Image: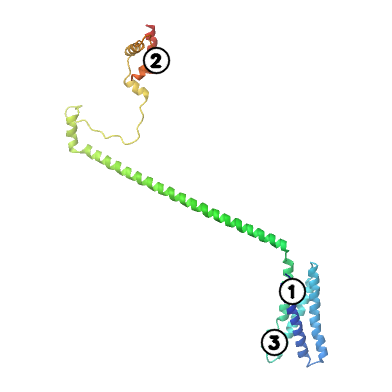
Amino acid sequence: MNAKTVLPAVGMTAVSMVLTLAVVVMWLGTAMPWPVAVVVGLGIDGGWLATLAYERRLAAQGDHSNAVTAVGWSFGLIATGVLIAHALTEESAGAWLAVAWLPIAAKALWLVHGLWERTALTGEALDAIQGIQQEARDEAAVARARLRAEAATEETRLTAVTQAGARVAHVQAKTADALSRAWSTLETAREGEDTGRALTSVTTRVTPGVTPRWELPVWGPTEPVSPFALETAGALTDEALDALVDQIRHSETPALSYREMATRFRSAGHSASEVRLRTAWKRVVAA
């Protein structure tokens, strides 16, 4: 894996060192003996190579030195400066300027290689990370599918409830309309001119010259009538109740018991409270 970054850095460094040495010999060879120019070029390349080797040693130990890094970049800038100065003195300056960036590019590639080494992981760690990422993607996909399904179910439920509510409202509206029209018909019949004459012919006058008024049926809640009110309306007198109890008691031989008499009393449609019925029984038995 390191070859992906170290090989480009090594190749760029080698090209930069050869190019720097050649330019120094060509440029300074006219002004001084060429062996001196070779020594100058090798000095620049040697200083650069030495600082690079020391940086790699520190990186292998997990250490770092800002001073060594600064010296290395200084040699790179010197090499680049030499190439740019040589390009400016030549007639084809553009061609030489096109390669003047190679030393800086070589240093940048070594920087990328160092970052690669500091962030590199083993195969087991990469497999574990891929497994975690895949598991997270699977869970996210399942959660999205669950949310979509729940949303579709809720939409279906709301649609069904809305349709049912619309049908109920439609039926209620039709019923209310029918009741309104029926009530209107009754009101029209009640207030009509012929209603009074029709009622006069079938009803008894309460007061001479006054026709009993026909009241409309009640449309609304009604109150239930209590059993006490029903009993009070048609209550038997004590004498009549005693006679009726005595008659039912002696309807068979031997005489009926109180429970049998009470059952036949109520089955016959008569009405009396339990207290009055038992009191009448006692009076009849004691007589």
* Residue 204 in the figure: left or right of residue 25: left
The residue closer to the viewer here, 123 or 20, is 123
Q: How is the image coloured?
A: rainbow
Q: How far apart, in angstroms, are the residues tagged by discs 1 and 3?
A: 26 Å
Residue at mark 3: 96
82 in relation to 195, above or below? below
Disc 2 marks which amino acid? Glu
Q: Residue at x 52, y 53 (%)?
A: 149
Disc 1 marks which amino acid? Val
The secondary structure type at the circle numbered 3 is helix
| Residue 179 falls in image quadrant | top left
Residue at mark 1: 6
Disc 3 marks which amino acid? Trp
| Residue 113 falls in image quadrant | bottom right
How many numbered marks are there? 3
Q: How far apart, in angstroms, are the residues tagged by discs 2 and 3?
A: 134 Å
Query: Which residue is farthest bottom?
Result: 30
The residue closer to the viewer here, 74 or 53, is 53
Residue at mark 2: 260
> Earlier along the polypeptide chain: callout 2 or callout 1?
1
Residue 174 seen in the current view: yes
Q: Nearer the viewer, mark 2 or mark 1?
A: 2
